[in-house]
Amino acid sequence: MNSFSDLGLSAPILRAIKESGYEQTTPIQSRVIPTILEGKDLIGVAQTGTGKTAAFSLPLIQCLLKDEGKRKARTARSLILAPTRELVIQISDNICDYSKYLHLRSTIVFGGASEKPQIKAIIPGVDILIATPGRLLDLMSQGHIKLNEVEFLVLDEADRMLDMGFIHDIRKIIKELPKKRQTVLLSATMPKSVTTLANSILIKPVRVEVAPAATTAEKVRQYVMMVPKSRKRDLLAHVLKDTEIKRVLIFTRTKHGANRVTTFLEKQGIPSAAIHGNKSQNARQRALNDFRDGAVRALVATDVAARGIDIDSVTHVINFELPNEPDSYVHRIGRTARAGATGISYSFCDHEERTYLKDIEKNIRQSVPVFERHPYHEEGMAPAPTDSAKNGKTGGRPNRNTRNSKPGNKNRRSNSQKPYKRAKTTAGKQTVKPN
Ligand code: AMP
């Protein structure tokens, strides 16, 4: 079953789906939508890029239609918790699109922005509240929001929420919800902490898994560049001379690192912007919009800030620093190769990061070919470069014979891993719908 019209969604929802440009359900959607419509609890193991947001939003919207207009003041009929402001906005944009022919009311709550408009929006009551845990708890403890009417709870990117230390906030929030409710938990990975949380809040959940976390890696052409730490900036400037690199997401490990790289790029005349937790919500949204519109070519981000961001046509991902968590690598390179494109990632690896690289390769079950045709190649794990290679340009071919690279890997892709086209949304647009 891969047609939306077979799923029991009502006509206004189907019309909105069609206008979003979706022709068929994705694998996760064809399994999750009917399960949620049957009223069952659900655990979904899926990453961004699989269509997971629509998978839970569409049946949620359908369920809320049953008692349209049942909203009560200062409360919500459904609650979606997500780890970051960006993800909250993205989910909200999607929900606004899918429910544009209906009279449901949704609103967003997240930190780093003024509380006032958020409080005002909840006063008449909403059908869908999308929130980060910290700010929601703040507004609850000040008495602005009550959760005693929530019939439907979604935890999106549960693994990330726990990584970010939200477990206590989540537990406090869940305590305030009615016991009789439907609960859906989505997570890219299923570490023990997420399983424990799931066991304590879901009742006889159906488990749906679409693709193991590591497989995103297979659709991205990945290269590693061995470079001394002190030459990474030079290498970055060198790599960015390649005009094929049109829209590049650059990852650093720290916020300061992101700022330093951005300043460096600006000095080199490369329009760039940084996005991380120290930036105001407005600054982050502006950076994202500029990147989307092509006003800046390079967006420099930390893992947390970039998580879940859905931007089409990121041509390249550069890991200026390798992450020490192998899963973060998969999330990072998964920001490219969306919407059917083939993405390319370059990871700058200095001597100290070689253990991270080993862990990453173990996790993705493939070795990353070494790209040694650049002027700053550092010998070590990879064979010494030839003289001609030393002077080569980025546009040259990587040495695919080094470190047992498997040339066939990039072509292996199962159906469940195909990226899906994204409908155009305006991040940050007003999400409170008039009645
Ligand atoms: P998500 O996994 O929710 O981050 O969604 C990834 C992208 O896929 C988003 O840009 C969605 O708009 C898009 N998408 C979701 N469902 C479909 C579908 N059935 N067909 C085409 N694109 C879709």
Image (spheres, rainbow, N blue to C red):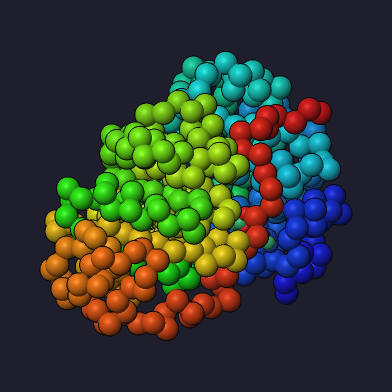
Quarter of the image holding residue 368?
A: bottom left
Image-based side of 406 in relation to 357, left or right: right
Residue in the picture at 14% in, 59% down: 351
Quadrant of the image where one finds ligand 1: bottom right
Q: Which residue appears farthest toward the right when viewing the image?
A: 11
Quarter of the image holding residue 206?
A: bottom right
> Height in image: 145 above or below 397?
above
Image-based side of 358 in relation to 293, left or right: left
> Viewer-proximal residue, 232 or 395?
395
Residue in the picture at 61% in, 38% down: 427
> Viewer-proximal residue, 112 or 142?
112
Residue in the picture at 49% in, 17% down: 142
Q: Position of residue 183 (x, y in %)?
A: 56, 50
Residue 119 in view = yes
Q: Position of residue 57 (x, y in %)?
A: 66, 50
Task: Pick the quarter of the image with the C terminus.
Answer: top right
Count the marks. Answer: 0
Quarter of the image holding residue 3?
A: bottom right
> Viewer-proximal residue, 137 or 180?
137
Residue in the picture at 64% in, 24% down: 122
> Viewer-proximal residue, 83 or 287?
287
Q: Position of residue 170 (x, y in %)?
A: 43, 39
Image-based side of 57 in relation to 367, left or right: right
Residue 335 in view = no
Task: Pick the quarter of the image with the N terminus.
Answer: bottom right
Image-based side of 125 in relation to 203, left or right: right
> Height in image: 8 above or below 165?
below
Q: Position of residue 270 (x, y in %)?
A: 43, 41
